[in-house]
Amino acid sequence: MVNRLSPEEAMFYFLDGSGTTTHLGALLILEPDADRTLDYASLVSLVENRLQLMPRYRQVVEEVSLGLARPLWVDDRDFDVTFHVRLSALPQPGTTDQLQEFIARILSRPLDRDRPLWELYLIEGLADGRLALLTKTHRCLLGNGDHPEISEVITDVEPDTEPLKDDLWLPARRPGPGETTLNAITDAMTRPGELAETVFRGGGPIADILSLADRSARFLGKTVQQAVNTAPDSPLNSSATSARLVTFAHVPRDGCQTIAERYECTFNDVVLGIITGVLRRWMLSVTDSVGHDTTVRAVLPLGARDAVVDGASGWFSEGRAEFITDLPLGEDAPTVRLMQVAGLADRYSQAQRRLAPGVRPPFGELGVVPFADRSARAFNSLFHRSYNVPISMSESLIDRRYVRGVPVGGLYTLPPLIAQRAMAISVNEYVDQVEFGFLADRNVVSDLPAMAGYVNESYEELLTGNTPLPRGAGEGI
């Protein structure tokens, strides 16, 4: 049976290019002790055992000649788990800065398209004897949020978990180019309208020759204009390279809950208030002043407006409904700024014109993928001004996780960073901490490491009601 990428999956696959890295992932900080630790062989064994829950992690993407149809998921007959699971080590003394620089280099490199589109790193040498796991997964593997990311599969809610029953995997025969082309034509013959759309609007050279990508872009433009107004001018919309920087920070979860109760707002309003304070500080560091009406437009999961639910398992919000709101950077008073954030988020999460269509292909019901080459550039240009910064948030509290019995002390997600976005932010509620991850274009936000300090300062000013003195203890991992 032919297993094609969905329109959304194919779109993310084709969106990779200069300045765009549509892979995402997670950083897990492990806290081994004398009784429980994790070595490379044990990690490989764990991954091999859990791959049966992630069939796409043993498949490659097979493109169809002339772009006549969406690519296929096909089994990798030469699959080698040790190519994907890798061992690395930090030099002494294993600081947070060294770890962040290592991760930035990994995320700056594209994934090998001739192999399954994921990597997993066991990183040794962290200070205090800790270990780290870094996952790197192409966005297309997650589908519309209905396929797990590897970090969600190799972690457990209990320290002692029995391995899955062995599952013998034998790769299916990989179809040849001629066969994939014939299958595409045969499939389309049952839907002649789709064949015409694919030939004249699809992702192959015919579409480029006829320059019909612009028609698709205009179609998308109408959709976006109905959903959002133009975002304010911002250097956050000037990403142009694949060079990355990352930084992490955390604050106490109970302190955020205290702030929410004090000001009668939601927990996630407090998180957005902290982010607004962070972006205000960053803006003041790159401009002479910030006007009272200065805002940044953010897109975030609609589920972030829901009440916190204990015990939910997933920590990626990719593929879920989103809305767009404004963060009032121009307001000086932290508590007033928080109230403005809460009011705007509550209003816009219920406004139809602020619901974000998200990153979706046009003509999706026909299975059309007009995003190769020039079409991808048209898409990126179109969404250049719909919002300034994406924020991904876990929609519920994540309970303690374990990897082969070793407790996970910190869990940070790493969002994708598409073209013309200079920064992406992720937030997780993990056990007793709220954990922030920042990913940015190195050539645009070269001072990204300062964000860790900004997080702590923004949190402290909301907790105390005063502007804090830099710099506190919540920086890094």
Image (cartoon, rainbow, N blue to C red):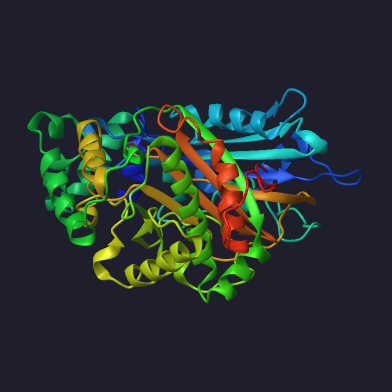
Q: Is residue 455 above or below residue 40?
A: below
x, y percent for residue 283: 41, 42
Please state which of residues 139 and 63 is positioned toward the viewer in this rendering. 139
Residue located farthest toward the left when viewing the structure as drawn: 210
Residue at image point 40% right, 50% down: 390
Horizontal arrangement in the rendering, residue 334 relative to residue 403 (left or right): left
x, y percent for residue 214: 12, 40
Please state which of residues 256 and 180 is positioned toward the viewer in this rendering. 256
Horizontal arrangement in the rendering, residue 441 relative to residue 263 (left or right): left
Please state which of residues 347 and 62 is positioned toward the viewer in this rendering. 347
x, y percent for residue 386: 26, 50
Quarter of the rendering occupied by the C terminus: top right
Horizontal arrangement in the rendering, residue 372 relative to residue 106 (left or right): left
Residue at image point 62% right, 56% down: 460
Visible residue check, residue 268: yes
Visible residue check, residue 1: no
Q: Is residue 251 above or below residue 445?
A: below
x, y percent for residue 51: 61, 46
Quarter where residue 110 is shown: top left
Residue located farthest toward the right when viewing the structure as drawn: 34
Total numbered circles: 0
